[in-house]
Image (cartoon, coloured by chain):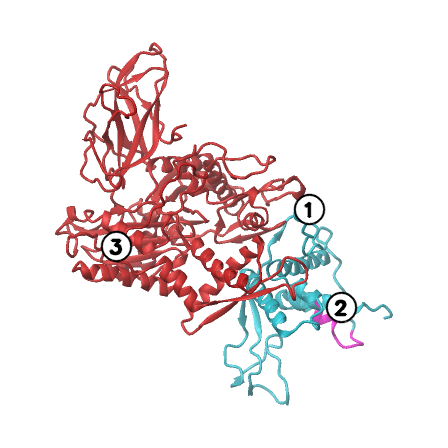
Chain colours: A red, B cyan
């Protein structure tokens, strides 16, 4: 493979995907790649964002051809999204959320959930692959035509993932990228990419805004998910170092929920006037409410904005329904509903699990983003304690106290919402006796992650400051304790730490020999846990009890020892070894104590279906 | 000249010409030559290049724009309906749909900027006049510099691109009939 000419940053988002590139030679800045896509039947245009949806055409529909593939029968992007409104059962959306859903087999064809029979269902991994494949083909058509060493496969690709993605979801993302032909791949956490974009956009000025001891809270509210990270600025031997010290949980809550909530308010008012909207009109209303919301949030003197929705027939006059969205409603629904003023001790409400749950995404039960933020800062109160003296923090009490905030994601274009978050946060900080946090001046909130990811390609070449921090989770394998079977009682398990918190790329965990016996030829499953708060456990630490807040159970892991050279049914003593690959994924391996050949080891499968 | 087009076709054609003249400099130049005063023969058209049927391209582009404005802003629905029997409230509701959608459609395909940035109603002085960009009205005489009042700031499409049309689709279908199963 030839040396890559570009670093390509890809923000594979829940609702939108963006891509940026930067030439590696010379002094260049990342540029957004406008993605050609079908924007309506037979019409191809370029857009800075590619909606992350796949639509499968029915035989009656004709081709969904693209310049590079005239005979295509599926579409990714804007037209796909529009068709999906009219024909929802043929559309896949939010594949990324399914990718981190431990309750399903993420390699199995399950999407679209309600697909009719003529649609071949695909897996969340394949859906992600199709978005990436579309980008690779588009890049090929626009930028690499006639030149083999310019293809996406030949470039250095940096793919962003939510900081909250667990090891299995990262693995699956990598699998999708490899399937799309990407060879030279690195994963990067989205909030880190946002901070890189900010550093890149600020040029040399960024050191005026943050200095040694600052703790930057990155608040990233996208279309479908909300992600928090804390990154500390440390001084080390006279130079600055960035250190990611904490990441939040995966929260399926974003801007789309807000637009839906507003549309619901308006349609309830219309219903009271006797005007019923159908599903299609409801969607138009959501779009109209988004425009109205932006107007109300952007212009403080506006009190209300009319929203109008057309009927479906060709008779527009007389069928268009007019309603309005008022400032008070936006205030009540968005500001109070999604950004309530709460105390730092607030906890997001959780939905009680019922026995029979409909297969669906685990959407956040509590829309209060500030409550999720409070819970994050409380859970991570210890994150900076190890750095005491090196970070300028306040009370060292019940809260992780940031000194600066970087906002990211389209929702936060609204100053009103940003200032609400900041005011609530500063209220908590004041109660903690910590100085108020300040906002870092903004970057392009929709495209920063892709830009920052491309810039990371330069950082990796030593042309910028790198954020360190390693893995944001520690990982544990559940081991059954030997004890006599008691009917109706699950044997107690201990959690053996196999990968400690903060493992850096390309490093191994030194695991003291902890012997396990594996049966040859049979898949053996282990329960698997992750923790974003237990920072001090070393590889080999065994936990006998823990709280559900400390350790979250992930999808089980599975090892199958091939029977070559050994008898089926034999028990082979092994120990586990963990490492972080250069790509940024967790690799768990079983190493036999008595190898038949030097270097013998078997990869452990991370994302196995729960209970399946 | 005996053949004359029916009114409906002329309205439709005028509409297309408006956008083509606005966004396509070459087309505008050709149209400008055709509208030359009687007695002056329009320039002989160059023999058409064998591969590209330019008239068909122009027509396809115009149809594409109409289709776009219908899809995003229901413009054809609006124009095709008889407005006279509706009261202002209905017209206002429909106008909001059309305005919002067409505005979004135009914004994602064109960058429209005023020709003059000065405030309308204020007085301005022009050192020279580009006949395409500036139209003098009222008491027009003398020579540059001209002083006058800016009545309309004018519009310029600083950038305009239509989506690329894939083959195999009928461009005359501005909106397909919809049948819900």
Determine whether, in the image, residue A482 is placed left or right of residue A100: left
Is A17 part of what is drawn in magenta?
A: no
How far separated are the C-alphas under marks 2 and 3?
A: 63 Å
Observer able to see residue A138: yes
Marks 1/2 in contact by CB < 8 Å: the verdict is: no
Q: Tell me which residue sits at (49%, 43%) in the image.
A: A131
* Quadrant where the image shows the N terminus of chain A: top left
Q: Depth check: A139 or A472 in front?
A: A472
* Quadrant where the image shows the C terminus of chain A: top left
**What is the secondary structure assignment of the residue under circle 3?**
strand
Q: Which mark is residue B168?
A: 1
Q: Residue furthest right?
A: B2
Q: On the same chain: label 1 and label 2?
A: yes
Quickly name the residue at label 3: A216
Q: Is residue B166 above or below residue B140?
A: above
| Mark count | 3
**What is the secondary structure assignment of the residue under circle 2?**
helix
Q: Is residue A174 above or below residue B36?
A: above
Q: Residues within 10 Å of mark 1 (few under 14, many from 20)?
A: few
Q: Is residue A421 above or below residue A582?
A: below
**What is the secondary structure assignment of the residue under circle 1?**
loop
Q: On the same chain: label 2 and label 3?
A: no
Residue A103 at x, y percent in the picture: 40, 35
User: What is the span of residues highlighted in magenta in the rendered image?
Assistant: B30-40
Residue B16 at x, y percent in the picture: 69, 65
Quickly name the residue at label 2: B10
């Amino acid at each position: 493979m030839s040396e890559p000419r570009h670093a390509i940053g890809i923000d594979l988002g829940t609702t939108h995907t963006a891509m940026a590139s930067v030439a590696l030679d010379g002094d260049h800045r990342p540029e957004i790649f406008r993605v050609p896509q079908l924007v309506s039947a037979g019409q191809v245009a370029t857009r800075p964002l590619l909606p992350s949806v796949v639509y499968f055409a029915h035989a009656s529909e004709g081709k969904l051809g693209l310049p590079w593939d005239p005979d295509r029968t599926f579409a990714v992007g804007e037209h796909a999204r529009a068709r999906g409104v009219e024909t929802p059962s043929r559309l896949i959306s939010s594949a990324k959320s399914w990718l981190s859903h431990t309750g399903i087999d993420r390699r199995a064809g399950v999407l679209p959930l309600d697909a009719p029979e003529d649609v071949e269902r695909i897996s969340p991994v394949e859906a992600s692959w199709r978005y990436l494949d579309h980008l690779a083909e588009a890049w090929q058509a626009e930028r690499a035509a006639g030149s083999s060493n310019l293809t996406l496969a030949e470039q250095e690709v940096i793919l962003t993932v939510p900081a909250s993605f667990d090891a299995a979801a990262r693995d699956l993302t990598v699998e999708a990228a490899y399937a799309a032909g990407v060879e030279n791949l690195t994963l990067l956490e989205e909030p880190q990419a946002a901070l890189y974009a900010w550093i890149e956009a600020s040029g040399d000025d960024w050191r005026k805004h943050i200095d040694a001891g600052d703790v930057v809270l990155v608040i990233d509210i996208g279309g479908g998910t909300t992600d928090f990270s804390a990154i500390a600025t440390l001084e080390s031997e006279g130079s600055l170092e960035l250190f990611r010290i904490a990441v939040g949980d995966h929260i399926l809550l974003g801007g789309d929920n807000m637009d839906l909530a507003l549309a619901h308010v308006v349609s309830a008012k219309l219903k009271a006037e006797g005007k019923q909207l159908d599903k299609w009109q409801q969607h138009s209303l959501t779009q109209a409410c988004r425009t109205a919301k932006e107007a109300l949030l952007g212009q403080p003197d506006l009190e209300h904005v009319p929203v109008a929705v057309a009927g479906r027939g060709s008779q527009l006059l007389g069928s268009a329904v007019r309603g309005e969205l008022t400032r008070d409603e936006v205030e009540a629904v968005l500001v109070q509903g999604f950004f309530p003023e709460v105390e730092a001790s607030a906890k997001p409400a959780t939905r009680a699990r019922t026995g029979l749950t409909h297969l669906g995404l685990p959407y956040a039960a509590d829309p209060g983003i500030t409550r999720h933020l409070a819970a994050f800062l409380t859970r991570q109160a210890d994150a900076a304690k190890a750095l005491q003296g090196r970070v300028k923090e306040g009370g060292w009490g019940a809260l992780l106290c940031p000194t600066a905030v970087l906002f990211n994601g389209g929702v936060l274009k609204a100053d009103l919402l940003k200032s609400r978050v900041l005011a609530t946060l500063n209220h908590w900080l004041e109660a903690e006796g910590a100085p108020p946090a300040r906002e870092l001046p903004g970057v392009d909130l929709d495209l920063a992650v892709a830009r920052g990811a491309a810039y990371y390609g330069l950082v990796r070449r030593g042309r910028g400051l790198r954020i360190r921090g390693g893995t944001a989770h520690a990982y544990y394998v559940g081991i059954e304790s030997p004890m006599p079977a008691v009917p109706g009682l699950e044997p107690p398990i201990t959690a053996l730490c196999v990968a400690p918190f903060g493992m850096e790329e390309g490093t191994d965990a030194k695991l003291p020999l902890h012997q396990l016996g594996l049966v040859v030829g049979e898949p053996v499953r282990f329960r698997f846990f992750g923790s974003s708060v237990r920072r001090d456990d070393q590889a080999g630490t065994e936990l006998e009890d823990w709280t559900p807040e400390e350790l979250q159970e992930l999808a089980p892991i599975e090892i199958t020892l091939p029977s070559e050279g050994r008898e089926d049914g034999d028990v082979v003593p092994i120990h586990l070894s963990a490492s972080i690959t250069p790509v940024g994924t967790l690799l768990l391996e079983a190493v036999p104590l008595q190898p038949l050949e030097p270097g013998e080891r078997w990869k452990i499968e991370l994302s196995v279906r729960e209970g399946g | 000249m005996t053949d004359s087009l029916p009114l409906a076709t002329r309205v439709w054609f005028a509409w297309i010409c408006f956008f083509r003249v606005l966004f396509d400099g070459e087309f505008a130049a050709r149209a400008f030559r055709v509208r030359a005063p009687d007695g002056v023969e329009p320039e002989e058209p160059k023999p058409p290049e064998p591969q590209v049927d330019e008239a068909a391209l122009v027509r396809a582009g115009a149809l594409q724009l109409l289709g776009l404005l219908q899809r995003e802003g229901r413009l054809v629905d609006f124009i095709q309906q008889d407005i006279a029997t509706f009261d202002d409230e209905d017209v206002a509701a429909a106008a909001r749909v059309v305005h919002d959608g067409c505005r979004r459609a135009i914004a994602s395909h064109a960058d429209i900027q005023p020709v003059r940035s000065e405030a309308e109603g204020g007085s301005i002085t022009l050192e020279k006049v580009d006949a395409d960009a500036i139209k003098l009205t009222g008491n027009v005489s003398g020579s540059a510099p001209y002083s006058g009042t800016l009545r309309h700031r004018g519009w310029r499409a600083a950038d305009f691109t239509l989506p690329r049309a894939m083959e195999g689709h009928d461009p005359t279908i501005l909106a397909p009939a919809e049948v819900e199963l």
